[in-house]
Amino acid sequence: MADKFVNIAHEQPDTPALVWRDRTVSYRELYLSARQAQARIACLPDDGTPLGLRAPKSPESVALVLGCLLAQRRFLLPSATLAEQTLAELFTASGCTTVLSELDAQWPGQGGVNTFTPDPARVTFMLTTSGSTGRPKVVPLTEGAVDRFTDWAAAHFGLTGVVLNYSPLNFDLCLLDIWATLKHGGTVVLADPARGTDAAHLADLLRDNEVEVVQAVPMLFELLAGGPPLPHVRQVIITGDTIAARTLARLPALFPNARIHNLYGCTETNDSLVHELDPARLPAGQIPLGTPLPDVEFRVIAEGGPLHGPGTGELEVRTPFQTTGYLDPALDADRFTADGFYRTGDLVRVGAGGELTLLGRNDFQVKVRGVRTNVQEVERVLQEHPEIAEAAVVAVPDPLAGHLLHAELRRAPSSRLNTLVLRQFCAERLAATSIPSTIRITAEPLPRTSTGKPDRQLLVRRNTKGNKDMDHTREITKFIVEEFVPDISTEDLAADYDLLAGGVIDSLGLLKVIAWLEDRFELAVDDIDLEPDSFRTIAAINAFVNQVQQPAGAQPAAGR
């Protein structure tokens, strides 16, 4: 794809390549930045090891990736939001002896610039899995695999116009909305992650830039649903997770001139199945996974072997876009078959006509009091409630039951939904063992991984009995700033800042804080000796809440 990008930069240098915040970057400018990055890389020893990239979303980071491609160097592109220790472990495990940042695309020095020679077998991108079920795995992709996919995507969706990029740079979705677009002369509108949940801003971004192609995880469509129509959009691509039926039902009004697609894939295989929906006949339940992309093969494996008719089993796929295996070959045996198929871990139902429907993950199957339960099915039921905007269900270890279910929910605006009503709703639709033992209802967005999926590991840690990892600091900080220091941002208030000595909270303010904590976290503080030091800092308030709050898994709090 690097040579195609260079050709476009020479043929249409003034065409906008990227839109970022208030900047528009032309193909000429992006090409020059990529050449600067390439020159910087040329000064490094080429010892055969991959380059590590710290690349938060920006035009400079895009140029840095292009510089690596032009320099014909493979590179590890992990999430820029991972913890420092996790990043260091990934770079070390991948053999990265040099780590570059977006500043290397602005390098002022001189370096030799090699002639680019295509090599379909050469590894280029080294992406990582989301890590939502464990440590991220490194997925190397060859130049040939990337080229085949980006050519298919551009031909199928028409990526020569204006395309939105909503996902972070490390997500495999970028192969379509950034790299396929730049390879074929389109314009990429980069959504700012800092405003990734600001529905009004996102709607303005699409409208002001007359975006034509929107690919995103369901969270974006949930944010935009109910807003004013976006008539310029002609292709909508839902991917990365299951979309709630009520959100899907609102898409035809939101995108009145768009074709709507459900695109299924994995980081390891890239996209493999696609289904176009009829806006006039949207399914009330699960969306079919659709038909295979060109040269993609699939099979469904049940306990007795491959299915040759209706039934349920695990989906296996083989694509011309997939990796040849994880960077750590010890991980391959569980996922890759001897004949080159990838075990997706997704349970699907094969209908009488051969259509595939996703049921959930086989690693989301748990036993609750001896009964096998699919937590994703519980999520789907919760998402059917009209007052639930987001839902995530996790299985929390329990010494007696084996596992208990915990539901984390974001209520819809103006909703007064409580757990009593929600339990009745579940009881009418779920088996008793599938009703969550604990439910937390909040107005805040659910925690998510860097790829936009619910952060299930964090939810499990927060809600495991006896775990001290409950972190309410963001929510507490937001309350303190809004109530007492509205002229600063939440990022400016450190968790260890002395709120009492600094005059942020006085005696009356302390009463207001305690009243809010009682209401928000349903704390019983009447019989507790309250010490001022418990409210001196954000960190101290968080510790106080954890100390007073009942352990998760005890009595669920009503109305939350």
Image (cartoon, helix red, strand yellow):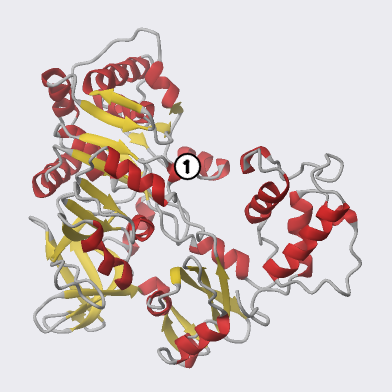
- Quadrant where the C terminus sits is bottom right
| Residue found 55% across the figure and 44% down from its top | 83
Q: Nearer the viewer, residue 481 or 400?
A: 481
Q: Nearer the viewer, residue 436 or 283?
A: 283
| Residue found 86% across the figure and 74% down from its top | 526
Q: Nearer the viewer, residue 406 or 499?
A: 499
The image shows residue 275 at horizontal and vertical percentages of 15, 64
Residue 177 visible in the displayed image: yes
Q: Is residue 519 above or below residue 105?
A: below
Left or right: 438, with 333 as reference point: right
Circle 1 residue: 194
Residues packed near mark 1 inside 10 Å, few (<14), some (14 to 19) or many (20 plus): few
Q: Nearer the viewer, residue 33 or 486?
A: 486
> Residue 170 is drawn in which quadrant?
top left
> Residue 229 is drawn in which quadrant?
bottom left
The image shows residue 393 at horizontal and vertical percentages of 48, 73
Number of numbered discs overlaid on the protein picture = 1
